[in-house]
Image: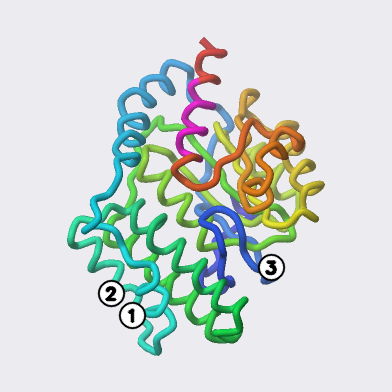
Amino acid sequence: MDEMRQGSISERLVERECWSEGRPAGGRATSRSARSRDATPADAGTLARTLRSGVIPRLVEAQRPATPESLPDPERLAHAALSDAPDAASDLVTGWFSTGTKFDVLCLDGLAPAARRLGEMWDDDRCDFAQVTLGTQHLARALRALCERDPAHPAPGCPRALFVSVPGEQHSLGSTMLVEIFRRSGWDAEGGAPRTMAQLAHAVRTHAYDVAGLSAGCSACIGTVATGVRSIRAASSVRTIGVIVGGRLFADDPSLAQAVGADGTARDAREALGLAGALVARSARRSA
């Protein structure tokens, strides 16, 4: 994805949903990786075996509820992110990880609600722009530290996914968490923020993604999302590519997913994992 190279996730503003809202913050597009890929999707048998042996068991494991003592404290994390100590949030997150808290729990029950809390404090005028920006940088730093402690190693032949915000919206913390959770659940996942529809079309044309996801936060973006869905389907090298949408726009009205031509919507990464797995399984059946 040479046209959507990775930018620093600390340069983005606070996002108020794990895979949804972010305050527009103009800037360059981002990407999980710029690895060269062929445009040939994995065969149906390989995908089916991967789902049975890797993706589905990991998804079941991820769905198991955490015990109360292992749950992170997002309020405490938000305040740590606002402190002057740049490593306070990182130390807190890696400390929870060291006691056995799972990666997805730390992201979805710790980092994501902590980011939302920063947004709420901004809305309530309890924090100014500079404080929230710095707090978000500290949360991004914590996520990077967590990824270093628990690196993802997708297996060969695993399904591929791309998750981006629509052109005109900038997301980083939430989309990065989504990508990392997918990678730890048996997917070869990448993320980005294409600046144009042409960049998005180029990505799905030159890389064999089984699933693509678009996120949007405001109602004004619905036309852009619909255009993005059509662009993905028209340009994709994978005829049966699944398209999912997320963000506040679709959380408020899930029926809009069908209106924009997507295969479904997900409120968070856990739902996105289930939906994406179902779409890949459907594609494998159709190709068999």
With 249 as the anchor, is 211 left or right in this view? left
Secondary structure category for the residue under label 1? loop
Query: Which stretch is magenta?
Result: 272-281
State the residue at coordinates (38%, 67%).
74
Is residue 97 positioned above or below 276 on the image? Answer: below
User: Pointers 2 and 3 in contact (CB under 8 A)?
Assistant: no
Q: Nearer the viewer, residue 98 or 8?
A: 98
Residue at image mark 1: 87
Residue at image mark 3: 24
State the residue at coordinates (34%, 23%).
52
Task: Give me the C-alpha separation between circle 2 and circle 3.
Answer: 29 Å
> What is the crowding at mark 1: few (fewer than 14 residues within 10 Å), some, or many (at least 20)?
some
Q: Nearer the viewer, residue 114 or 44?
A: 114
With 201 as the anchor, is 77 left or right in this view? left
State the residue at coordinates (50%, 47%).
268
Q: Can residue 4 be found in the magenta stretch?
A: no
Q: Can residue 276 be found in the magenta stretch?
A: yes
Give the total number of marks visible in the rendering: 3
Secondary structure category for the residue under label 3? loop
What amino acid does circle 1 point to?
Asp
Q: Nearer the viewer, residue 34 or 154?
A: 154
Is residue 254 positioned above or below 136 on the image? Answer: above
Secondary structure mostly taken by the magenta-highlighted segment of the chain: helix
- Residue reaching furthest bottom? 84
Give percent across and percent down for residue 178.
Answer: 48, 50
Is residue 242 positioned above or below 143 on the image? Answer: above
